[in-house]
Amino acid sequence: MIDIPYRSALIIGVGPGISGSLTRLLRAAEIPVVIAARHVDKLTPLVDQTGAIALPVDASDAGQIERLFAETDARIGAPEIVLYNASGRLRGPIAELDPSQVEQAVAVSALGAFYTVQQAAKRMVPAGKGAILLTGATAGIKGFALSAPFAMGKFALRGLAQSAARELAPQGIHVAHVVVDGGVRAEHRPDPPDRPDSTLDPDAIAQCYIDLLRQHRSAWSSELEVRPWVEKF
Amino acid sequence: MIDIPYRSALIIGVGPGISGSLTRLLRAAEIPVVIAARHVDKLTPLVDQTGAIALPVDASDAGQIERLFAETDARIGAPEIVLYNASGRLRGPIAELDPSQVEQAVAVSALGAFYTVQQAAKRMVPAGKGAILLTGATAGIKGFALSAPFAMGKFALRGLAQSAARELAPQGIHVAHVVVDGGVRAEHRPDPPDRPDSTLDPDAIAQCYIDLLRQHRSAWSSELEVRPWVEKF
Amino acid sequence: MIDIPYRSALIIGVGPGISGSLTRLLRAAEIPVVIAARHVDKLTPLVDQTGAIALPVDASDAGQIERLFAETDARIGAPEIVLYNASGRLRGPIAELDPSQVEQAVAVSALGAFYTVQQAAKRMVPAGKGAILLTGATAGIKGFALSAPFAMGKFALRGLAQSAARELAPQGIHVAHVVVDGGVRAEHRPDPPDRPDSTLDPDAIAQCYIDLLRQHRSAWSSELEVRPWVEKF
Amino acid sequence: MIDIPYRSALIIGVGPGISGSLTRLLRAAEIPVVIAARHVDKLTPLVDQTGAIALPVDASDAGQIERLFAETDARIGAPEIVLYNASGRLRGPIAELDPSQVEQAVAVSALGAFYTVQQAAKRMVPAGKGAILLTGATAGIKGFALSAPFAMGKFALRGLAQSAARELAPQGIHVAHVVVDGGVRAEHRPDPPDRPDSTLDPDAIAQCYIDLLRQHRSAWSSELEVRPWVEKF
């Protein structure tokens, strides 16, 4: 069994497989896990498989994030690992986007991450211990055409990650931003037969999160970029 | 008189001197200018000095930005130069910040810029011409401790700038993000006598904006960093 | 006539047009210019046209750079503007490159720049004044496949530029690294008729160098990226 | 015993502890290891402790690197893991550095890495498998004052890493550049008692290299930054 130096985990936002894979790895290490998403019923198979606790949350709402942490405290204790994995994507020419949808996309990608980091910090700073993982994207490093809201949200997330790492690392809290560069494999998005491993295997990504969680504080990474071997970059 | 290939300008957000200096340079080139800020009465000296038109706006409100552009159209024609110079700064430990103030800071630094770029694009894309300038900060490149909301806003602005540049440049619109690295000189913040030019002279910054406006489309810059000669970086 | 706050210039390495264009602009401002390249006879038209002085140099040889500066001192006085515009490019699979050609490519792109910056610093530091311009490339920001030696040389140049800017700016010397992102227009490489200005006009690039030279020390840029409006990036 | 998907290793350049720690971890996984450095006698304790084979090399000499690989082939088979850990550091004002020492510093940090990557590629490309690790430094990301040669070498190394990753990853070879940001702990440089883990523990760094070696090709990292929890950045 892998040795992970934390005793409880909260995962917010069920991405295409990453959250599920991480939940399985953490549960295999006997760490209690709360998983939170907008639609909890989608989490039933994962709950059945792993014994994780599923709770509903709209990550773009500060009050709901606050209540989610309180409920997590009550169910498994204050989370020592927190992963924010939600994001709001919206594509289209700048001139044609609906401003309120842009606001919502930025709120999910970035403000929700702030509320989450804040609630995590409130618990981890007094404890002098904890790990905060933030799932980023290439869009947080390079702003692509026809994708301004996603660029805004993921850039903001990276800014938050850097600021939080500088503030919280000396207080014993490991903050890491993971740049997922490529498509994540999913049932509806399998690898083309002639290009094996050309999408990111969510289990492989989750293993990288575990590696980060196991890093010694004398050599912490605050950012990690992962991409398939054949991905152009 | 400097030759600038645009005929009208809208400047949103009166920063510590940059907007004023740019207004003066544009007016000296006989370009009509609308300046917009939350408190229009503060703009009276600039209006008196330059003949610019001052209009009120809360840049964090999409509807107000839309109306500001409509009013600008009516007063000086569709703006061919648009500068977004507003930003929301908020300092403090992550655990102690007020979420609603964080939202407001990100809205002013980044969402207001989006609304502005959108309104500019609606006018410039059909015309196949225009320049959009966005005032950034070092916080958009590096997220500092105790300054998460400003990092989020300025990172998001940079993501917007990159995405907009990639989308709009091939349509003839010059998008440039200017990273102001250092304190901007102001009446309440003069240079220390033993460190001349250790703050950024707003006239010097504005001249850089003019240089960008005059660049030929075969050699456009999409990002420019400016800092005092003695600034540590 | 443009006002440039320097009185003499040395340009090393005649790139595809940039050095020629800058020579013309500086000469138009009545600044004496020495141009240096491996094959001086290629410079005859430029000398005839502008009255610049041409001197031979192998930029990868420290002794030759030292002698070039001494000769420049004698002819036009210590150069207050120095541009390093030479680069060594070499393409091919890593496994197949000739190590001695790799060494030579890195020497031209990067070591020659070091010798140049060093000679410039020896003159400019005591004077407390000067400008050093370094012509970079996208390859200095992003290392492309099948182009390792060019990536090494241009990355090293950027490292030199940053280090020199941090060391020399507080001594009154403006160091700027210009990232030329795209093909530079030349007689043998004209624009496709259906894509006007899709290559960089060397006159437009040179104008950006002039803009840098005219920046006030309270707002110096240490890096500038220029690319055609339709260039993918 | 850790499962590492490679069967032989060559480590060039014995840094302050990193190479020793990695040798121990690889040997514990029963992987044969050749270690190479300028002064082989310094390696005796490591050889005695681990059974690694020590060979002499001047990494700045292409021919010596070629012969080192040939000797490694003969002793343990073609290396499937190659770490380049040598670097040349030289400090001082730009105007005062000795050009030939600058050339040597760049040769050790960057050209030696090229020779190494080249020899590795010659073996790994036909095999369709292998891992190349390059030890970088903060100086490869940010060029510091009074340290131009180190900045040049480490920037060039990063350019090489990016170019090699883009060329070789789709051929099955994992290239990773590790940015070591901070001092590495050593006997002569222990942690201050009041700042535990304020230097990088070489065992902790080596564990990060092992994590990279174990990454699945669907989620490879090409760059990893590691720093102590209390390091300013």
Image (cartoon, coloured by chain):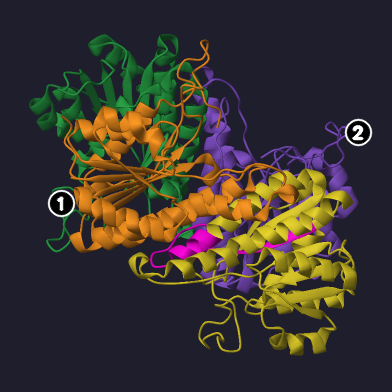
Chain colours: A yellow, B orange, C green, D purple
Residue A56, horizontal then vertical, whole percent: 73, 78
Above or below, C224 against B108 in this view is above
Q: Nearer the viewer, mark 2 or mark 1?
A: 2
Q: Residues within 10 Å of mark 2 (few under 14, many from 20)?
A: few
Say whether residue D206 is left or right of residue B81.
Answer: right
The mark found on residue D193 in the picture is 2
Residue D172, horizontal then vertical, whole percent: 57, 71
Q: Is residue A17 magenta?
A: no
- Quadrant of the drawing holding the C terminus of chain D: top right
Say whether residue B52 is left or right of residue A38.
Answer: left
The mark found on residue C188 in the picture is 1
Front residue of B163/A187: it is B163
Q: Is residue A132 magenta?
A: yes
Above or below, C167 against C97 in this view is above
Q: CA distance from mark 2 to mark 1?
A: 66 Å
Helix, strand or loop status at disc 1: loop
Q: Residue drawn 58% across and 34% down?
A: D150
Residue B197, horizontal then vertical, whole percent: 45, 19
Front residue of D203/B138: it is B138
Q: Residue drawn 61% across and 74% down?
A: D218
Say whether residue A6 is left or right of residue D154.
Answer: right
Q: Which residues are magenta?
A: A131-153
- Quadrant of the drawing holding the N terminus of chain D: bottom right
